[in-house]
Image (cartoon, rainbow, N blue to C red):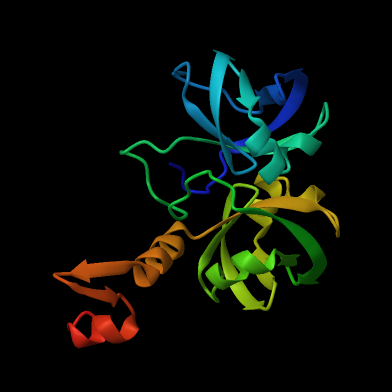
Amino acid sequence: MFTGIIQGRGKVVGFRSVRGGRAFEFEAEFALDSPEEGESIAVNGACLTAYNISTRRFSTDVSPESLSRTTLGALSIGATVNLERALQLSDRLGGHIVSGHVDCVGTLVAVKQEGDFTILDFSLPPENDRYVIEKGSITVDGISLTVNSCSKGIFSVSIIPHTLQMTTLAELKSGGKVNIEVDIIGKYVEKLLAEKKSVGDKSIIISKGYLAEKGFY
């Protein structure tokens, strides 16, 4: 589990093909203190298992499924990535709850400046659009962001100078691809509302009306 607060960037220093997937070696710009072999590290928002951890370097294996659902397969030697180590129970939850399971790949469609702030507009696949709400949370390449506004297939976020400095967003150009994870809570609520439940011999659907009738809404 992660928070979407990027600890620093890293670079791809090597990769090779492994049984349909790919093995990467990354070098972080910060020290990997108290490393544990097999710990989780989010790379551009994708939760990966780290091994051969040494000072600033670590290796990961990326499965064919992860390569097909993320931008990791497009990484080349020298590419910069956002890194976040897994959340500890004693950590501050400064962003929002992030699983590190990428839902889709989005595209940067517009960039504009508003004073010291950078406004980025992203498109995303139609099937993921319903999970994006104004002032809700979203994860872009591992970064916890607040949705400024959204319309069909498009959402906008405002980036502060510190976030530009600490992440890869400053390098992103129009047409660039990013990993997107929508708010995990919305997906669970949707499933609960749609799922049929049986009470005795009566089949019901949990909906807003049903919840209101029972005093929960």
The correct choice, above or below, for 54 with respect to 43 in the image is above
Residue that protrudes farthest toward the left in the picture: 200
Quadrant where the C terminus sits is bottom left
Res 54 seen here: no
Quadrant where the N terminus sits is top left
Q: Position of residue 64 (x, y in %)?
A: 67, 32
The correct choice, above or below, for 96 with respect to 50 in the image is below
Q: Which residue does the image show at 24% across and 86% down from the upper left?
A: 212
Instruction: Tell me which corner region of the image, top left, top right, bottom left or bottom right, holds residue 79.
Output: top right
Q: Which residue does the image show at 64% across and 77% down from the upper left?
A: 150
Residue that protrudes farthest toward the front in the picture: 201
Task: Judge left or right: residue 141 versus residue 185.
Answer: right
The correct choice, above or below, for 45 with respect to 95 in the image is above
Number of numbered callouts drawn: 0
Instruction: Tell me which corner region of the image, top left, top right, bottom left or bottom right, holds residue 81.
Output: top right
Q: Position of residue 5 (x, y in %)?
A: 53, 47
Task: Judge left or right: residue 129 versus residue 115.
Answer: left
Front one among 210 and 4: 210
Front one among 128 and 196: 196
Q: Which residue does the image show at 38% across and 66% down from the upper left?
A: 189
Res 207 seen here: yes
Instruction: Tell me which corner region of the image, top left, top right, bottom left or bottom right, holds residue 128.
Output: bottom right
Q: Position of residue 43 (x, y in %)?
A: 62, 36
